Image: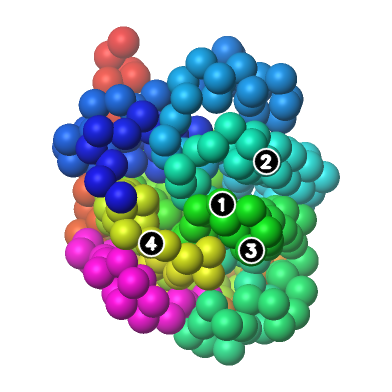
Amino acid sequence: MDIRNKRIVVTGGAGFLGRHVVARLRQHGCTQVMIPRSQEYDLTREADILRLLHKERPHLILHLAAKVGGIGANRKFPGTFLYQNLIMGAQLIEAARRLGVDKFVMVGTICSYPKFTPVPFKETDLWNGYPEETNAPYGLAKKLLLAQLQAYRQEFGFNGVNVLLVNLYGPGDNFDLETSHVIPALIRKCLEARERGEKAITVWGTGRPTREFLYVEDAAEALVRAAEVLDTSEPVNIGSGQEIAIADLAHLIARKTGFTGEIRFDPSMPDGQPRRCLDVTRAQQWLGFKAKTSLEEGLEKTIAWYQAARRAAKAA
């Protein structure tokens, strides 16, 4: 699909990932990009979805809007995370099918994988078990939307594609300690502890689990590639293919932020999934995509952005 002359709706286009995707689309020559705002369109309401699609008549939808958060938020709001993600996606896919949208790009999550998936995670293992308990409701909602697109392709010929994103980070991330993911939380904790002269920070869990991270600008590139060339509803892992233990990540961020105190791990808090690392062969073969930004480079850019944002907030 040549997307440059298409009318494109990016749900969640004002969010962390969405802002980078919209910027990449515009760099790519797309001039008709519409970003529905939640104040005007509540995507959990079918009437609002229909109003949006009737008004914009998109050729392409990139569905990025989601209710997301770290382990703490997932434990506190499991029903909200399941319902809002499921209802938004299911109604949007159905409305897009009925109104003849040419292509639908669904952003899924590796939280859909079984808790004890062999590493590296292969897409063929997606249905071989139940997700890790702390984020299972969110992961299952996204997993059912993947099944919906596969079923709609089979029955209706609807062109919906699925990409499964690993943990993202980068400029514009959520640094709220109540709802953030691990990288922005650690960056904020280390910087604030350094400024206050504190001698230690506490990190949830044992530090032993591993995670994989993808710089947000690389993720945006992968999504634009999926919009252009992906033509199957089989899921495609999008990640860096590199894993790091949480303890090693914490020490790396401490070094990058200049925090020299002790890092204490709290084993009374949940670790989440034991290991996460993706097999990214499909992304390379089907999308021609390979992550460009190393973790160290991405962390430096993210820390610099957050420090600049804090200075600007203080000066305002």
Q: Which residue is mark 4?
A: 230
Q: Which residues are magenta?
A: 276-295
Whether tag 4 and tag 2 are in contact, CB under 8 A, the answer is no
Marks 1 and 2 sit apart, C-alpha to C-alpha, by 10 Å
| Foreground residue among 90 and 188 | 90
How many C-alpha atoms fall within 10 Å of the one at disc 2: few (<14), some, or many (≥20)?
Answer: some
Query: Which mark, by number, is residue 94?
Result: 2
Query: Which mark, by number, is residue 154?
Result: 3
Q: Which residue is mark 1?
A: 158
Q: Residue at x 54, y 78 (%)?
A: 123
Whether tag 1 and tag 2 are in contact, CB under 8 A, the answer is no
Q: Amino acid at mark 1?
A: Phe
- Residue 285 spot, x, y in % from top left: 31, 77
Q: Amino acid at mark 3?
A: Gln
- Residue 315 spot, x, y in % from top left: 28, 14
Dot placed on the residue nearer the N-terminal end, 4 or 2: 2
Q: Amino acid at mark 4?
A: Leu
Marks 3 and 1 sit apart, C-alpha to C-alpha, by 8 Å
Left or right for 275, reference 215: right
Query: Is residue 261 something that shows in the picture?
Result: no
| Foreground residue among 215 and 23 | 23
